[in-house]
Structures are given as C-alpha cells and as structure tokens.
C-alpha cells in the first residue's frame, strides 16, 4: 500500500506515523514460524545442557518464550536478525507491501540499513534482575546509534509488531514534533539515552500499533519503550531504510539494495550472499564503536 498525502503530511509534521494494515498474516507467518523454530532449537539445547526442565512445546508463539525465559535467560542468546540470518526474515526485508510504504517516503531507490533488530519484550513479571534498559529502552533518538557520517542521510525507522502492541503489552512512547530540534545530546550510562536536561518540554504520547501495522519514525524523533505488564511476549521487528548510495552510519556492517527501478539487477536476492556478508562483517568489526556515545 502507498501512503496517502494526509499520512505523509502527518509524518512530516509530527515525526512519526502509525499505519495499520500494511502487512497481512501471510506476510508475517513465515517470519513467526522461523522465530518459533529458533526458539525450539534453543529450548532443545538448553534442555540437553540441563539449564531448563521443560520445553513448553505446546505453548503458542506469544507465550512460549516467556515461559522458557523464566527458566533461563540464555534462551535469548543469538536472538537477533543478523545472528539468526533466517531465509524468511531475509525475504521479509524485501516485502513488497512494506517497501511500497517505504517508497512513499524515500523514492524508488531503496537500501536496507544494517541497523535491524528482532525484539522479544517479556512480561515484567518474568523479567527478573535484567537491567531495565535491555527490555524497556530509555528515551533516545535513532540518529544517536549511528556514526556522524550518516547525519545527512534520511534514515527512517519502520517498527513492526508481530503481536498487538498495546499500552499493556509495552508499546512505544514518542514525543511528537520534537524531531525538529535535531540531534539532542546523549549519554551511554544505562543504555544510550538523551541526557535529562536535553529532554524536550513536550508531552509524550503512547503509540499502540496492531499486528500487521507499522510505526514509522524520523531518526530524530525521541522515543522509548514501556513495560510489558501483560502476560504475553511483545515481539517486534525494528528495521531502517534509506536511499541507495548514502552513508548508513554503520560502515562496517552490510547494507544492501532492496528495490531499484533504475537497476533491478542490483537488488540483493541471494540469501547465502547476505549471510556471508554478515558473517564476515561481524568478525571484522569486533571491538568497533557502534553508537556515537
């Protein structure tokens, strides 16, 4: 689907936009199945190692991970897009329904930025003593997690829930209009976050988003995670897209073309090549500074 002129205007005015109905169940089902398979493998490994006693094989997608996490937080080791490198996720990065929305804002020559994450926000009741910023990211701007080289680049965040993201399950909060202030000063303490004295004097708002919807954010929009007080896991995918040929802010990690009207042959469609790029990059970039603070 393409964004309407009214939606584009709201995004340009407020720095964020919630768009329901971008993705169908058929779009998301292969990704969810792939995550399920990963969780099942990890559960089998941890059971073999004696670190969990029950694999909870009959539990649904939105509940099983939390039950395993309550036994061993190691269930999440390797749970991210660039570590898992699944075929279904790779195909999803090219999803035409998603890219039609991206194209509405960035044009026809599109690159997938290498900053991309899969997140499982467990209920507060099972979070345990894990530092809060691992589950509920503090107030920050996405521009703060890129190198300065990407300051001229329009990198747009597309946040995609795999279950309904409600206030109860821990949807994001944003500060509307604050992107116009540009990059605010950040600190590294307690997770990359805006220093308190730099916080805009604007009332934040919650941005719930149903499964199949997308939250779009300007890279200067301050936002944060909120606690999951429900009894299910709030799964989400965090992607960024930009115009092809511009700096990504992570020059040591692989970006790739996902759509091109002028050079369709330049689109990366080879899953094995994508995997090889990430494996090489993760090895060669060990010790690199990821964020600007």
Image: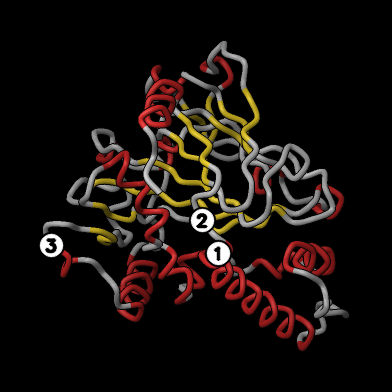
Q: Are marks 2 and 3 in contact (CB under 8 Å)?
A: no
Q: Is residue 155 above or below residue 74?
A: above
Q: Could you tell me residue 83's position as x and y percent?
A: 49, 70
| Total labels drawn | 3
Question: In 3D space, how far apart are the residues under numbered discs 1 and 3 (Cα atoms)?
Answer: 28 Å
* Picture quadrant of residue 56: bottom right
Q: Is residue 122 above or below residue 83?
A: above
**Label 3: how many Cα within 10 Å (few below 14, some 14–19, many 20+):** few
Disc 2 element = loop
**Mark 1 or mark 3: whose residue is earlier in sequence:** 1
Residue that numbered label 2 is attached to: 23
State the residue at coordinates (88%, 80%).
Answer: 53
Q: Could you tell me residue 84's position as x and y percent?
A: 51, 72
Which of the two residues, 120 or 279, is positioned nearer the viewer here?
120
Residue 38's label in the rendered image is none
Which of the two residues, 45 or 226, is positioned nearer the viewer here?
226
Disc 1 element = helix
From this viewpoint, which residue is outermost toward the left? 262
Q: Are marks 2 and 1 in contact (CB under 8 Å)?
A: yes
Q: Could you tell me residue 16's position as x and y percent?
A: 47, 31
Q: Is residue 188 left or right of residue 135?
A: left
Which of the two residues, 223 or 15, is positioned nearer the viewer here?
15
Question: In 3D space, how far apart are the residues under numbered discs 2 and 3 (Cα atoms)?
Answer: 26 Å
Residue 263's label in the rendered image is 3
* Picture quadrant of residue 220: top left
State the residue at coordinates (44%, 38%).
Answer: 142
**Mark 2 or mark 3: whose residue is earlier in sequence:** 2
Residue 28's label in the rendered image is 1
Indicate the quadrant containing the C terminus: top left, top right, bottom left or bottom right.
Answer: top left
């Amino acid at each position: 689907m393409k964004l309407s002129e009214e939606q584009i205007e709201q995004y340009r005015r407020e720095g964020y936009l919630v768009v329901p109905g971008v993705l169908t169940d058929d779009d998301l089902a292969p990704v969810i199945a792939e995550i399920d398979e990963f969780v099942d493998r990890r559960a089998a490994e941890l059971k073999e190692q004696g670190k969990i006693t029950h694999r909870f094989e009959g539990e649904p997608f939105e509940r099983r991970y939390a039950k395993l996490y309550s036994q061993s937080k190691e269930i999440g080791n390797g749970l991210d897009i660039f570590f898992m490198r699944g075929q279904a996720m790779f195909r999803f990065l090219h999803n035409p329904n998603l890219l039609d929305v991206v194209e509405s804002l960035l044009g026809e020559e599109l690159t997938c930025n290498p900053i991309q994450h899969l997140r499982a926000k467990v209920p507060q009741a099972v979070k345990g003593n894990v530092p809060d910023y691992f589950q509920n990211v503090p107030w920050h701007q996405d521009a703060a997690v890129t190198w300065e080289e990407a300051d001229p680049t329009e990198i747009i965040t597309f946040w995609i829930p795999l279950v309904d993201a409600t206030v109860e399950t821990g949807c994001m909060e944003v500060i509307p209009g604050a992107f116009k202030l540009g990059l605010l000063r950040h600190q590294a303490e307690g997770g990359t976050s805006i220093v308190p004295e730099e916080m805009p004097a604007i009332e934040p708002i919650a941005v719930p988003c149903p499964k199949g919807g997308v939250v779009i954010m300007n890279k200067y929009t301050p936002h944060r995670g909120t606690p999951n007080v429900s009894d299910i896991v709030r799964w989400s995918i965090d992607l960024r897209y930009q115009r092809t040929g511009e700096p990504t802010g992570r020059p040591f990690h692989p970006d790739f073309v996902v759509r091109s009207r002028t050079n369709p042959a330049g689109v990366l469609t080879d899953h094995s090549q994508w995997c090889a790029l990430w494996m090489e990059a993760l090895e060669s970039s060990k010790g690199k500074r990821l964020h600007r603070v």
